[in-house]
Image (cartoon, rainbow, N blue to C red):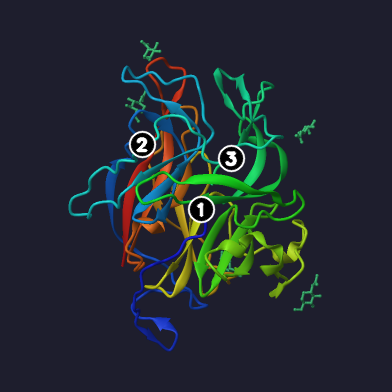
Amino acid sequence: MTPRFFPYSALALIVCGTVLGAPSDDRGRIIPVVASTTTYGDLIDPGLNRDSCSSTLWANDVLWVCRDTQQAFANGSIGTHLVANTVSLSGLPSAPSNPIQLVLSSPQGYGPIFYAFEADECPQEGCGDGVCGPGICGDGTRWVNAYGFMAKQRLLGLSVVNATGYSLYHVTSQRPGVIPSAKMHINAFWSATQIGYGSAASVVRNGFAYLYGATPDRKLAVARAALTGLLSSLEDHKIYEYYVNGTWARTPPVNTDPTIVLPNTSAVQGTMYWSPKWQSYVWIGGDGFPNANFLISTAPKPEGPWSAPQQFYSGVVGNGTLAAYSAVAHPDLTDGTGNYIFITWTKTHFDVDGIFNVYEQPLVRVDWQ
Ligand SMILES: *[C@@H]1O[C@H](CO)[C@@H](O)[C@H](O)[C@H]1NC(C)=O
Ligand SMILES: *[C@@H]1O[C@H](CO)[C@@H](O)[C@H](O)[C@H]1NC(C)=O
Ligand SMILES: *[C@@H]1O[C@H](CO)[C@@H](O)[C@H](O)[C@H]1NC(C)=O
Ligand SMILES: *[C@@H]1O[C@H](CO)[C@@H](O)[C@H](O)[C@H]1NC(C)=O
Ligand SMILES: *[C@@H]1O[C@H](CO)[C@@H](O)[C@H](O)[C@H]1NC(C)=O
């Protein structure tokens, strides 16, 4: 995901470092409590079948980046061609008093890949497992590529067989309402033995972009980049600092360094944001395939200490090949106060031919006490 800006400001009542009214744990970290939830039905994706969509505020629109995209025909069949990632635009969701399904519009039509494949990622059309498309290697494996810092990962089923580093992509806006373009900026910005900082989650606050990446044992490590200009300096390795053994260091650690692991974090797909309401950084993510159980954790600083993740929502799972996955939060769909959040997950069922999975992405608004 590209780092986000929060264009809204909000005041929170703070007395002696405690946010009024919010329950907290023994170390003063907020323990969120759900006040109400509102279901908005599935995201509407006219003519397209795709999974794992994430969102970013983009000029006056919301830019959605989704993963595996196929055509969805009116007769209920799913097309055999697959594009590894595509984008759409939407407005903001309606108020919870009148929940309306959100439409992701794709004026560019079916097809153009957003984050393109590189020369070593089977960029030509290939086929495997009954589908064809760029990134499919013809030996049962395929490359996946979605979300600025991208893992270069080759999948066999759901197993990663090659991870050759992380590339930095640059998304360029043309004008509001027009699908932006993305180009690969620096191939393998992070190497395969480094953390893919920015590929798991990111949050922009107080003049820094905080960039999270997965450690080999599926927890998070964090780096920060002081922002000068409009995120343009992210391509300069010299501006990065890495959280290592309790301090910010200038030398990038190896990904197996045990002192970079942030306690109580998880690298299962998730989202970071800043909550003015709680004066806290917030992580929301899933407990992993095959469930859609949503967990939340809070911390006073980006590096922690993170509270023990608590389950706050359990999404309905599907009856296709993969029951549920990609539990993510969408802070850019909110007003930035932290009073509520939107979440989605992906669930599947089989198409009319019983061949392909149809992806459903329920959208739910969670209001906090
Ligand atoms: C559904 O429509 C598509 C596109 O027109 C076509 O290729 C496919 O064969 C149709 N499937 C069935 C089951 O009729
Ligand atoms: C991917 O991994 C396989 C098995 O480890 C290896 O044979 C192959 O050369 C690797 N491919 C790339 C592009 O790194
Ligand atoms: C980490 O920092 C502590 C002091 O805070 C020090 O005692 C320890 O040796 C450091 N560990 C490593 C691996 O550098
Ligand atoms: C992690 O969570 C546990 C509870 O599961 C808690 O006792 C502990 O303090 C947390 N660790 C940190 C570093 O916050
Ligand atoms: C599977 O789920 C879909 C929708 O999510 C539903 O329409 C269908 O009836 C379910 N099929 C079975 C066999 O339960």
What secondary structure is found at the residue carrying circle 1? strand
Q: Amino acid at mark 2?
A: Pro
Labels 3 and 2: the sequence-earlier one:
2
Residue 358 in sight from this viewpoint: yes
| Residue 255 locus on image (x, y percent) | 74, 56
Q: Residues within 10 Å of mark 2 (few under 14, many from 20)?
A: few
What's the distance in space between the residues labelled 3 and 1, CA to CA? 17 Å
Question: Left or right: 204 with respect to 243?
Answer: left
The residue pinned by badge 1 equals 270
Please tell me which residue lies in front, 216 or 238: 238
| Residue 281 locus on image (x, y percent) | 49, 68
What secondary structure is found at the residue carrying circle 2? loop
Q: Residues within 10 Å of mark 3 (few under 14, many from 20)?
A: many
Q: Amino acid at mark 1?
A: Gly
Please tell me which residue lies in front, 167 or 27: 167
- Residue occupying the point 58% across, 38% down: 116
What's the distance in space between the residues labelled 3 and 2, CA to CA? 22 Å
- Residue occupying the point 31% across, 20% down: 74
Which of the 4 quarters of the picture holds residue 346? top left
The residue pinned by badge 3 equals 145
Which of the 4 quarters of the picture holds residue 276? bottom left
Relative to 190, does residue 209 appear above or below in the rendering?
A: below
The residue pinned by badge 2 equals 107
Which of the 4 quarters of the picture holds residue 341? bottom left
Q: Amino acid at mark 3?
A: Asn
